[in-house]
Amino acid sequence: MRQQAGLRLLAAALCAAMVTTAATAQDLPGWGDVRGFLTQTLAPGQEIASFAWVPDNPDPALAREAIGVIYPEIAGSAGNVDIRVAHFTRVEAGFTMNRAVSNVFGFEPRNARFLPDRIEVTTTVLGPNDPRCCPSVARVWTISRTDWSARPLN
């Protein structure tokens, strides 16, 4: 039992180390409680390992849309996480979820490009010889603005 608890703690530490966010509370002056907003919107009531907020502009006053990603912990799974992704748009009162996005995988969402017909975002995924703790391959996803499903570009 003690060994399992130690393994869970190690797995959680490894997960926290590999889930570097595109935006954290410290990186988001002026954005408010993004983590709380994403948790309430995408994973209410769940424990969250990490999150990412990837807006089209780093200035909250100029941003019009964003990709929000949250990594809820999977209960009883020794530190494994799920991924939930959504597209958010600005409304008068702030941002609201526009659509859930399916088929995005990986960690460290970054380098989003908001194009008229699609959104491209990069994540880090497992390579063929990577241990589960340590993904190392950059994968670019294209998200269709028609069906809000992602497909890998590379």
Image: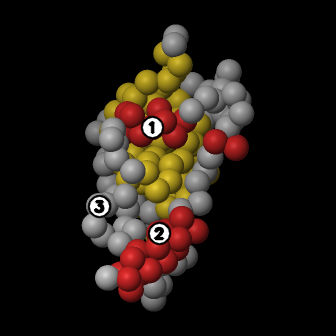
Residue 75 numbered mark, or none: 3
The single residue placed furthest to the bottom in the displayed view is 129
Left or right of 125 in this view: 150: left
Q: CA distance from mark 2 to mark 3?
A: 12 Å
Residue bearing mark 1:
38
Q: Residues within 10 Å of mark 1 (few under 14, many from 20)?
A: many
77, 149: nearer the viewer: 77
Give, as a three-letter code, the residue at label 2.
Ala
Dot 2: what SS? helix
Give, as a three-letter code, the residue at label 1.
Leu
Residue bearing mark 2:
12
Q: CA distance from mark 3 to mark 1?
A: 19 Å
Q: Earlier in the sequence, mark 2 or mark 3?
A: 2
Q: Are marks 1 and 2 in contact (CB under 8 Å)?
A: no
Q: Position of residue 66 (x, y in %)?
A: 52, 35
Q: Residues within 10 Å of mark 2 (few under 14, many from 20)?
A: some
Q: Position of residue 19 (x, y in %)?
A: 53, 62
Dot 3: what SS? loop
Q: Residue at x 51, y 13 (%)?
A: 93
In the rendered view, tell whether residue 35 sits above or below residue 51.
above
- Which is more foreground, mark 3 or mark 1? 3
Whether residue 151 is visible to the viewer of this picture, yes or no, is no
Give, as a three-letter code, the residue at label 3.
Ala
In the rendered view, tell whether residue 146 sits above or below residue 14.
above
The single residue placed furthest to the front in the displayed view is 2
Q: Residue at x 32, y 54 (%)?
A: 103
Q: Quadrant of the N terminus?
A: bottom left
Dot 1: what SS? helix
